[in-house]
Image: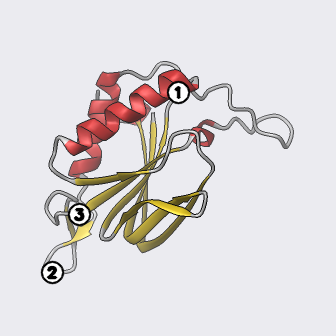
């Protein structure tokens, strides 16, 4: 599982020219899911993301988590995070989970985030989405389940 986490001062996602999710201070998270991902992996990823200390404290140091600042989340499913570009110029997406499996885990991630009493906005799984954001910092963290303790 991969999360591309961007600290944002605001972000929104549109589908068919209508805003379906919008946040202010918090994280825009692009979520990639692969074949061997599980609910246990999803829980570990959510826990790690919510504890990342990348927001400024009163001294201007990155020492606060999204929970500490009462931030918001905009969660977007993005299978292209598992693009394989090794051969040729056209990526393949064979490492991305099948839509049925990916959508179940995406919904599970949303549920786990909401259990933490945080405002969670989302895109629409499988839709053609337009995402706008103001990356604050900029701060962008790539969180890969292969690199964290599960």
Q: Residue at x 58, y 23 (%)?
A: 98
For residue 33, side relative to residue 59 (left or right): right
Gap in angstroms between the C-alphas marked 2 and 3: 18 Å
**Which comes sooner in the sequence, label 1 or label 2?**
1
Disc number for residue 59? 2
Instruction: Report how far apart the C-alphas of labels 1 and 2 lie in the structure.
Output: 39 Å
Q: Residue at x 86, y 38 (%)?
A: 88
For this orientation, the residue located farthest to the bottom is 59
Looking at the image, residue 56 lies above or below residue 91 = below
Q: Secondary structure at mark 1?
A: loop
Q: Which mark is residue 71?
A: 3
Residue for badge 1: 34
Along the line of sight, the residue nearer the viewer: 48 or 20: 20
Mark-to-mark CA distance, 3 and 1 = 28 Å
Query: Which numbered disc, 2 or 3, marks the residue that appears first in the sequence?
Result: 2
- Please give the count of numbered marks on the rendered protein: 3
Give yes or no for contact between labels 2 and 3 (Cβ–Cβ under 8 Å): no
Who's the residue at 76% across and 36% down the image?
A: 86
Q: Are marks 1 and 2 in contact (CB under 8 Å)?
A: no
Residues packed near mark 2 inside 10 Å, few (<14), some (14 to 19) or many (20 plus)? few
Image position of 147 with respect to 59: above or below = above
Image coordinates for residue 106, horizontal then vertical, percent: 41, 34
Mark 3, secondary structure of its residue: loop
């Amino acid at each position: 599982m991969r999360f591309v986490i961007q600290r944002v001062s605001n972000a929104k996602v549109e589908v068919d020219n209508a805003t379906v999710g919008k946040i202010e201070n918090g994280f825009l998270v692009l979520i990639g899911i692969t074949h061997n991902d599980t609910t246990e992996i999803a829980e570990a990823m959510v826990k790690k993301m919510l504890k990342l200390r990348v927001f400024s404290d009163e001294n201007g140091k990155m020492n606060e988590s999204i929970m500490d600042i009462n931030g918001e989340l905009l969660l977007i499913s993005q299978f292209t995070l598992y693009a394989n570009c090794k051969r040729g110029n056209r990526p393949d997406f064979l490492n991305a989970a099948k839509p049925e499996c990916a959508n179940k885990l995406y919904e599970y991630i949303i549920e786990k985030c909401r259990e933490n009493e945080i405002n969670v906005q989302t895109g629409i799984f499988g839709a053609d989405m337009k995402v706008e954001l103001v990356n604050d910092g900029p701060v962008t963290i790539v969180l890969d389940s292969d690199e964290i303790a599960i």
